[in-house]
Image: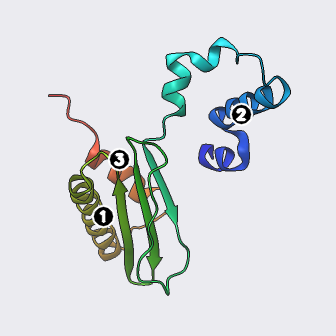
Amino acid sequence: AMTARAGSGHGVDRHLYALRKAWVLARPNEPAPDLYNSPGYAALSETVLSTSNCGNPALKSFGFGPVSHDGIGIGYIIKERGLSYSICSRSISVDAVAEELRAFLNSTQELLKRDAKRKSLRPGALVQRFAGAVAPSSA
């Protein structure tokens, strides 16, 4: 629900970005309000992970670059029997990110196979099981 709201322009970061742009257009010779120079706004404005689905399974690959200097861009295509993706970054090891992504996808695939064998896949079942599998240990 939160992702859908953000995607339709209801995210706080997008609202603040639009207000800043409106300020600059209306008052080009005045400095922006202090909020826009705060560490909090800087952190909110830094997009570390940016993803995009191509949506055309006929393509072999699809690239999508990071939207910030220290970020990661992942372009992916969902295919009938798998997933094709590319990872781009200017400053982060894409090999390390790729290894983590492969491990995640393999774990997810195993969970789906296990649930399919049990015929117990119902809405929320996978999420509940996966959340338990990746919860940090309390030790």
Distance Cα–Cα, label 3 vs label 2: 31 Å
Q: Is residue 25 left or right of residue 131?
A: right
Amino acid type for the residue under numbered disc 2: His
Residue 70: x %, y % from top left: 37, 41
Residue 12: x %, y % from top left: 65, 32
Q: Badge 3: how crowded within 10 Å, few (<14), some, or many (20+)?
A: few
Quarter of the picture holding the C terminus? top left
Q: Is residue 52 left or right of residue 4?
A: left
Camera-nearest residue between 60 and 22: 22
Camera-nearest residue between 70 and 6: 70
Distance Cα–Cα, label 1 vs label 3: 14 Å
Q: What residue is at 44 percent from the left and 64 percent from the top?
A: 75
Q: What secondary structure is marked by label 1?
A: helix
Q: Is the residue under label 3 in contact with that under label 1 (CB below 8 Å)?
A: no
Q: Earlier in the sequence, mark 1 or mark 3?
A: 1
| Farthest residue, direction bottom | 58
Badge 1 is on which residue? 105
The circle drawn on residue 50 is none
Q: What residue is at 51 percent from the left and 25 percent from the top?
A: 42
Amino acid type for the residue under numbered disc 3: Ala
Nearer to us: label 1 or label 2: 2
The circle drawn on residue 131 is 3
Residue 61 to residue 71: above or below: below
Residue 46: x %, y % from top left: 49, 35
Q: Is residue 125 left or right of residue 13?
A: left
| Residue 101 figure quarter | bottom left
Residue 9: x %, y % from top left: 72, 44
Camera-nearest residue between 23 and 1: 23
| Residue 28 figure quarter | top right
Residue 93 to residue 114: above or below: above
Badge 2 is on which residue? 15
Amino acid type for the residue under numbered disc 1: Leu
